């Protein structure tokens, strides 16, 4: 089998700890604190599973009770994009998935194999009273290589191409203005031509990929460091980077 990126190797080299399942009157319980899934798309079982599920429920509840807006960005590996945006105050929920293509309800394997037209992306639900779309754009630029349109960092291919997916005419205008401002700044010798597109259907990736940096931190940091993502961002943006 051929692997298209370092991430694929890291995702398959999972550390598996044996889990002891006990049966009681109330049902099954897991005594293991670290049973990690192997192949991409499978589900990790850890002692934190219920905590993670509860966090997700809280995110959904907060988003439902707040006047929200949606933003969608692609900057390569969605594990990293999610980690980059989760730390922003006002971001209520993030979902790793696929968009920009024509295949309906694509799977991870279909997308990385190619031919779907989709790229890995992040759908962000945010509170516009706490963080503006313009501020999200500024954060996006500092966490993407805007000159590499055929992949990002160590991940190559169409499924890792960067883009901004606008959900309204206002978002598109703000995105285009932010790109024009960067090109007019004189900071770069090369023109930024990163695509700004109308948002289309978005398909969430399997649960295995959601909050991956929290559920599998060792794999995540090994991948991110091995991909030299932060080193390249520092090269482009200097101290302004993420």
Image: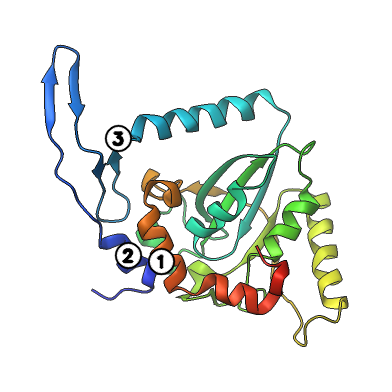
Q: Which residue is mark 2?
A: 10
List the single residue furthest toward the front: 239
The tag on residue 92 is: none
Residue shown at 80% from the left, 53% from the top: 134
Q: Position of residue 19 (x, y in %)?
A: 15, 39
Relative depth, front residue between 25 and 2: 25
Judged left or right of residue 152, residue 124 is right
How many residues crowd around disc 3 within 10 Å: few (fewer than 14), some, or many (20 or more)?
A: some
Specify whether residue 168 is in view: yes
For label 2, the SS is helix
Q: Quadrant of the N terminus?
A: bottom left
The tag on residue 47 is: 3
Relative depth, front residue between 28 and 99: 28
The tag on residue 223 is: 1
Residues at marks 3 and 2, CA–CA distance in whole angstroms: 22 Å
Residues at marks 3 and 1, CA–CA distance in whole angstroms: 23 Å
Verify CB contact (< 8 Å) between mark 3 and mark 2. Answer: no
Q: Position of residue 80 (x, y in %)?
A: 51, 59
Mark found first going from the N terminus, 2 or 1: 2
Residue shown at 35% from the left, 60% from the top: 109
């Amino acid at each position: 089998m051929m692997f298209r990126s370092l991430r694929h190797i890291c995702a398959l080299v999972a550390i598996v700890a044996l889990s002891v399942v006990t049966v009681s009157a109330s049902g099954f319980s897991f005594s293991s604190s670290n049973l990690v899934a192997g192949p991409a798309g499978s589900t990790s079982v850890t002692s934190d599973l219920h905590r993670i599920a509860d966090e997700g429920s809280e995110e959904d509840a907060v988003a439902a009770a707040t006047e929200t807006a949606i933003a969608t960005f692609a900057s390569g590996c969605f594990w990293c994009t999610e980690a980059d945006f989760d730390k922003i105050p006002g971001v209520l929920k993030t979902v790793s998935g696929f968009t920009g293509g024509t295949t309906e309800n694509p799977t991870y394997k279909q997308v990385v194999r190619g031919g779907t037209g989709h790229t890995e992306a992040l759908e962000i639900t945010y509170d516009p009273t706490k963080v503006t779309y313009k501020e999200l754009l500024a954060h996006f630029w500092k966490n993407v290589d805007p000159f590499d349109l055929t992949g990002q960092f160590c991940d190559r291919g169409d499924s890792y191409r960067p883009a901004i997916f606008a959900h309204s005419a206002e978002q598109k205008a703000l995105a285009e203005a932010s790109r024009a401002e960067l090109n007019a700044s004189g900071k770069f010798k090369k023109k930024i031509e990163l695509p700004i597109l109308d948002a289309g259907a978005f398909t969430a990736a399997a649960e295995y990929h959601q909050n991956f940096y929290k559920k599998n931190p060792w794999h995540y940091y090994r991948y991110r460091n091995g991909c030299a993502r932060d080193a390249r961002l520092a090269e482009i943006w200097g101290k302004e980077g993420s």
